[in-house]
Amino acid sequence: MKSTIPDSGVPITLAAGNGADRHEASLHGEILLRLRDYVVEGNIPEGARIPERQLCEMLGISRTPLREALKVLAAEGLIELLPNRGARVRQLSQRDLEELFDVMAGLESLAGRLACEAISDAEITAIEQLHYEMYGHYLHRDMHGYFQANQRIHESIVAAARNEALKTAYANFAGRIRRVRYSANFARKRQRWAEAMREHEAILDALRRRAGSELSDILFQHLRNKRTAAIEHLTEPQEPAPASP
Amino acid sequence: MKSTIPDSGVPITLAAGNGADRHEASLHGEILLRLRDYVVEGNIPEGARIPERQLCEMLGISRTPLREALKVLAAEGLIELLPNRGARVRQLSQRDLEELFDVMAGLESLAGRLACEAISDAEITAIEQLHYEMYGHYLHRDMHGYFQANQRIHESIVAAARNEALKTAYANFAGRIRRVRYSANFARKRQRWAEAMREHEAILDALRRRAGSELSDILFQHLRNKRTAAIEHLTEPQEPAPASP
DNA sequence: ACGGCAAAAAATGAATGCAAAATGGCTATC
DNA sequence: GATAGCCATTTTGCATTCATTTTTTGCCGT
């Protein structure tokens, strides 16, 4: 009564591929999904050493499939594997974060450019809808709702680019900075919030006109500003953490 | 007579990470490097099934580290893993290629933008040097030399972006389309070649002026044109006719 | 002869076992 | 009293073994 493999011949391509992540079947695939979520959601302290045995009994499997999953997570950049010294959650320096944000900005910028070539009026209408919804959250000072609508807008743009490889790469980078990204949105001061709304209106405008390179510019700058806000948020309140010796 | 592990404590981060790919130590790392090269260089026919045993004895190892390496290669998008049906070299449809080229274009476009923020005069001079060298190859109709100089120029721009995450992602995508990319350059008709030279001059010009978003646009369009040439070459490779309609 | 079915053979997926390396604690020494 | 070196324990890396699944092959029925 294992998970009876439902569909046959489904092409499996791991994280970086164009295809979908269909890992439900094999055990190591299941483990991969669960571990990835577990790490992305921050259940493991950064830099902490995680003995394989412990993970094994936590997940109820043997070490072989676990190690395969760990290798993949390392390839995705979520964890680090030190030779003979185990796996630990990747610790992102400020510089790392800046770099990752910039790559995200580049990918979204690309997504916008491509979207202008292929997006339908209906899709634009849907994004407008999200925009108004987001505006409502803005007016009500509803951070969480705002955050979600915002995220869905950006995802819609990426989806409109009609590029699976891009979508996958985007998802990968998004996962790597997810924790920070979330708190970055919460870090928004009123000032920055209003700015972001204006930027979003410019985005919509460029999208309506299918102005590819213009939208590309706006999106990059928009994400750049987000980056700045996020980094500031991290350096200010976060405290010289008690560096464990 | 295992590979005696030379250095200790070197942080290992697999393909998608910011860090370097230091896998020389562990066996599976060694295998990973060798297999990746082996696949990228096209030694395995596309879509062919490759029994693990066969690879094992070819590489002289057991299945465990091999399978770990395969998982990583799948995560990088170089191979496909079908459940219970083994690994095969990823077969790229025309659509896949278009997508991958577009992502490459986006990454280089980003690289150009970032490079404008950080590039030194010396680096620009070096790129100019490469440009003249490339121009020489162009005049002498030296395809191979042209190709190499061209590649080094693009790599220099990526390097000037000062972003390890970007560099790694770029290398990953470059590996995935390497075979096609090479032949794409050889596919250049005289016409396209001259165009490419002009585009490169525009690239240099924008770079000198540190005109970020302008350079971003030019680079994207440049790569887009390359994409078109490559796809054309693939769809009707046997057409020596210079006939224009 | 051809197509479908069943059993054998082979390949994959996962678990276990064993050797090498690292970690931690202890003692001996200065 | 602190530090360097040594030994026991833990942990990782890899090979081997076991269990399923797939693929092949041979057979039977139509």
Image: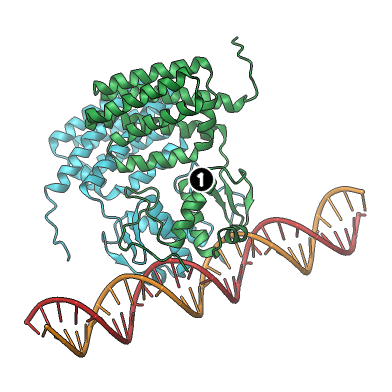
Chain colours: A cyan, B green, C orange, D red
Q: In the depicted view, which residue is nearer to us: B112 or C2?
A: B112
Left or right: residue A4 compared with residue B122: right
Q: How crowded is mark 1: few (under 14 residues within 10 Å), some or many (20 or more)?
A: many
> Residue A118, how many percent across, how many down?
45, 25
Residue A59 location, quadrant? bottom left
Q: In the depicted view, which residue is nearer to us: B187 or C6?
A: B187
Helix, strand or loop at label 1? It is loop
- Examine the rendering and report whether any part of residue A173 can be seen: yes
Find disc 1 in the rendering and name its residue: B78
Identity of the residue furthest to the top in this view? B245
In the depicted structure, whether residue A78 falls above or below residue B174: below
Q: Which residue is drawn at 39% across and 55% down?
A: A73
Residue B58 location, quadrant? bottom right
In the depicted structure, whether residue A151 falls above or below residue A84: above
Label 1 sits on what residue type? Leu
> Residue B85, how many percent across, how many down?
62, 55
Left or right: residue B108 compared with residue A20: left
> Residue A191, how many percent across, how many down?
13, 34
Q: Which residue is drawn at 25% across and 45% down?
A: A97
> Residue B114, how many percent across, how many down?
27, 32
Total residue callouts: 1
- Examine the rendering and report whether any part of residue A209 can be seen: no
Quadrant of the rendering where the C terminus of chain B is positioned = top right
What subunit carries mark 1? B
Q: Which residue is drawn at 35% across and 18% down?
A: B201
Residue B152 location, quadrant? top left
